């Protein structure tokens, strides 16, 4: 029935009157489509546009004309203040250190675990994999107090190192799970050929498996970068000194320190958004494919 | 961070996957492979599972962080039952699951359907909808805080289009604050839900829809009778993700209202954080954390069961 209907549909398409009718209907539907989507898209970016307006307005303009008014001035004061008095430069450096170290360490450790679990007969490997994934699904709230205590006991509380270690441990399960899937999909012949050639385990991992996993690593890397960079709760849990804060936590402080100086607050928020926006646009394909991995069912 | 885990499950059985034939010869696991596995596993056990277990025992104590913790049995949990702020937080969390989940799913699904077929301009539309997704929840919160100010964009625009009577102190009024935060969160979430449904729609057979269309089914009927049933997999992912994320929601509320005014935007996570790190009621905070865990565990298990099924 499906087939015959499809044939009927195709047949209908070649009859001239039907074609004409179709074209006009298509034009009308396109008008509807853009008529709805253009206002919606504008509505969607309005918040971003107005934040940019606020960030580039002068304090006097804002206090005279209102925060939500269209700009009548152009000033970089907000951005200058954020860097000179807000300490945003330092916090950006902190964020970059933490993000780069966390993402690289996580992907390295996760790929090792995924390699072991996907290629060797480890007892209970399915259970271990799911246990690791389960750890990543836990609500972080149940970890916060003990984690801050453990960091204190280890003498690493209030260091960027603690923030890196904690985020690596929490993210590992997810990255391992995804990489395990990719590694299992690599045909066994590839692996076998390497064994026959006399390659050792380490060599197989570094020279064969990792290069084949490059797309998965890229997708995970893009996702992980935004997640780690955007984290707030772990930073608030293991850090106390303001000069060690990553940009998200610093931003909340900025909000308290520059009350009603909205151009400063907006400028800080814009600066905090720029790095992840760059990652997104540079790796949009990886990013979206990372989110989509396997969801088509 | 959980979001994609389930989605990833599918890749676990990518086409062409074969059991490595060399495996029988490798029955004995080399020592270095044990190191490969145990290093990450130990990190996770020490910094995820061990702390999680500790929260359970801490929740049975009264402790301010200095001196010894005093064991009080289930007292913290009994106190929670009569704690009005906890009840507010619990109700707010339910509102959050329904409102945040419902709105982002309806808008995200509608946009995915609209932007599914290749058409002029969909690339731009999609990018616009995706864009908020890359902002951190903290940045999103601050953005919207600026918009919601009494002389902010929202109020000024309302006035400009003749709806000045709707002007409001959105975040200062306990009646509107939670919904104001919720809208900001939905704005950011829609792009993500749209990605999931776009992926799901790729797996929908267009011939079926075409056939139904020829049979005279309206677009509405086609959507509910033909497309929706084929999206059941994505639907269950979206459902689990939404609930788990809702129970974790913290950053955006903390950035916008810190649970105020008068606890009107308090969620379980913010109340937990406040009790633990502001008031230093570590036992009580742990008890709240345990209740969050207990609410989440059902959905975590659902999620894992699905992941297992996908994998085998």
Image (spheres, coloured by chain):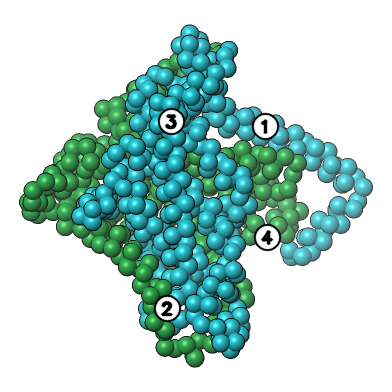
Q: Which residue is mark 3?
A: B142
Label 4 resides on the chain identified as: B
Which chain is indicated by disc 2? Answer: B
A196 or A50: nearer the viewer: A196
Image coordinates of residue B288 in percent, x first then y, are 23, 47
Report, in whole angstroms, how far the alpha carbon at label 2 lies from the one at label 1. 55 Å
Q: Distance of mark 4 from mark 3, alpha carbons?
A: 42 Å
Residue B297 in the image: state x and y as whole percent: 32, 58
Helix, strand or loop at label 2? It is: helix
Sequence order check, earlier mark of 4 and 3: 3
| Colour applied to chain B | green
User: How far apart are the two marked residues, 2 and 4, measured between alpha carbons?
Assistant: 43 Å
Cα distance between the residues tagged 2 and 3: 46 Å
Q: Chain of mark 1?
A: A
Q: Are marks 4 and 3 in contact (CB under 8 Å)?
A: no
| Residue wearing tag 1 | A38
């Amino acid at each position: 029935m499906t087939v015959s209907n499809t044939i009927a549909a195709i047949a209908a398409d070649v009859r001239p009157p039907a074609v004409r009718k179709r074209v006009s209907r298509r034009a009308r539907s396109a008008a509807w489509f853009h008529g709805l989507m253009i206002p919606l898209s504008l509505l969607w970016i309005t918040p971003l546009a107005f934040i940019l307006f606020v960030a580039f307005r002068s304090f006097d303009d804002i206090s005279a004309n209102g925060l939500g008014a269209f700009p009548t001035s152009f000033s970089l004061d907000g951005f200058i203040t954020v860097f000179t008095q807000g300490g945003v430069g330092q916090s950006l450096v902190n964020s970059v250190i933490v993000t780069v170290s966390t993402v690289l360490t996580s992907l390295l450790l996760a790929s090792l675990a995924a390699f072991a679990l996907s290629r060797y007969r480890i007892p209970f490997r399915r259970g271990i994999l799911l246990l690791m994934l389960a750890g990543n699904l836990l609500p972080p709230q149940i970890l916060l107090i003990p984690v801050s205590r453990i960091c204190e006991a280890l003498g690493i509380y209030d260091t960027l190192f603690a923030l890196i270690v904690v985020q690596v441990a929490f993210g590992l399960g997810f990255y391992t799970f995804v990489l395990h899937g990719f590694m299992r999909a690599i045909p066994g012949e590839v692996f076998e050929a390497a064994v026959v050639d006399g390659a050792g385990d380490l060599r197989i991992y570094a020279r064969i498996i990792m290069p084949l996993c490059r797309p998965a690593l890229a997708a995970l890397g893009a996702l992980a970068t935004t997640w780690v960079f955007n984290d707030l709760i772990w930073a608030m849990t293991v850090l106390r000194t303001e000069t060690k804060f990553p940009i998200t936590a610093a931003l909340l402080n900025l909000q308290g320190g520059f009350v009603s100086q909205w151009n400063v607050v907006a400028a800080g928020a814009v600066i905090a958004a720029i790095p992840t926006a760059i990652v997104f646009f540079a790796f949009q394909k990886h990013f979206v494919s990372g989110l989509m991995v396997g969801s088509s069912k | 961070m959980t979001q994609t885990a389930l989605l990833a499950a599918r890749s676990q059985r990518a086409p062409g996957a074969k059991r490595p034939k060399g495996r029988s010869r490798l029955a004995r696991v080399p020592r270095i492979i044990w190191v490969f596995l145990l290093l990450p596993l130990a990190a996770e056990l020490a910094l995820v599972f061990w702390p999680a277990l500790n929260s359970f025992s801490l929740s049975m104590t009264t402790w301010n962080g200095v001196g010894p913790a005093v064991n009080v049995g289930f007292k913290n949990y009994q106190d929670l039952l009569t704690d009005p702020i906890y009840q507010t937080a619990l109700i707010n969390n339910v509102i959050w699951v329904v409102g945040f989940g419902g709105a982002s799913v309806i808008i995200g699904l509608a946009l995915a359907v609209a932007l599914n077929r290749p058409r002029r301009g969909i690339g731009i539309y999609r990018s616009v909808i995706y864009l908020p997704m890359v902002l951190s929840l903290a940045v999103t919160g601050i953005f919207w805080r600026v918009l919601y100010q009494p002389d902010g964009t929202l109020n000024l625009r309302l006035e400009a289009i003749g709806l000045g009577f709707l002007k409001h102190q959105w975040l200062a009024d306990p009646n509107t604050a939670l919904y104001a935060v919720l809208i900001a969160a939905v704005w950011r979430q829609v792009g993500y839900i749209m990605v999931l449904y776009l992926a799901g729609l790729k797996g929908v057979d267009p011939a079926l829809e075409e056939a139904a269309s020829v049979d005279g089914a309206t677009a509405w009927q086609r959507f509910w009778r033909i497309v929706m049933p084929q999206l059941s997999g994505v639907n269950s992912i979206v459902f689990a993700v939404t609930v788990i994320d809702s129970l974790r929601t913290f950053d955006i509320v903390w950035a916008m209202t810190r649970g105020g005014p008068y606890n009107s935007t308090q969620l379980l996570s913010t109340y937990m954080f406040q009790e633990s790190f502001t008031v230093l009621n570590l036992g009580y905070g742990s008890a709240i954390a345990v209740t969050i865990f207990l609410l989440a565990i059902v959905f975590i298990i659902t999620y894992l069961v699905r992941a297992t099924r996908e994998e085998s």
